[in-house]
Image (cartoon, rainbow, N blue to C red):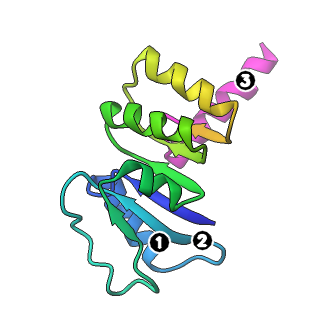
Amino acid sequence: MKIGVYGANGRIGKLLLEELKGGYKGLELSSVFVRQKCETDFSSFSHAPLVTNDLRAFVRACECVVDFSLPKGVDHLLEALLECPRILVSGTTGLEKETLEKMQKLALKAPLLHAHNMSLGIMMLNQLAFLASLKL
């Protein structure tokens, strides 16, 4: 699957790029979206991804977008994804109601995962809370 990283100069974006550098069977870093110059050196990657500030080119170059950006950026990303639907995994928090509504529209066209906190501990606590609620 071709992966696009949106928000690549951010803290989590840099971690994602570093992780994808090692390579995973079936995953390929195909595109990277940055507003300014990308801070990552791709010379050690098996192939160089498209690094661009052209949102539509970024989306067209991937099958799945991984987003850990800022709320304002997600809104622009969703506009592009509604035109050219792709799988979206988003961990961006603080989204406005209008942005969440755009996410709901995209979810009708493509698989979408939006989680406010992707840490394993929080996911386990959420699951435990759900299981406890079934017993109440």
For the point 53% across and 62% down, the residue is 3
Residue 132's x, y, as percent? Answer: 72, 23
For the point 39% across and 69% down, the residue is 50
Secondary structure under tag 2 reads loop
10 versus 103 height, above or below: below
Distance CA(mark 3)–CA(mark 2): 36 Å
* Discs 1/3, front: 1
- Residue 128 highlighted magenta (yes or no): yes
Which secondary structure dominates the residues rendered in magenta?
Answer: helix
Mark 2 / mark 1, whichever is N-terminal? 1
In the rendered image, which quarter contains the N terminus? bottom right
* Discs 3/2, front: 2
Residue 27 is tagged as: 2
87 versus 106 height, above or below: below
Distance CA(mark 1)–CA(mark 3): 36 Å
Q: Which residue bears the numbered disc 1?
A: 20
Secondary structure under tag 1 reads helix
Q: Nearer the viewer, residue 79 or 103?
A: 79
In the rendered image, which quarter contains the C terminus? top right
Q: Which residues are magenta?
A: 115-136
- Decide if residue 71 is on the left or right side of residue 108: left
Q: Quadrant of residue 94?
A: top left
Mark 3 / mark 2, whichever is N-terminal? 2
Amino acid tagged 1: Leu
Amino acid tagged 2: Leu
Mark 1 / mark 3, whichever is N-terminal? 1
Residue 55's x, y, as percent? Answer: 38, 49
Whether residue 16 is visible here, answered yes or no, is no
122 versus 36 height, above or below: above
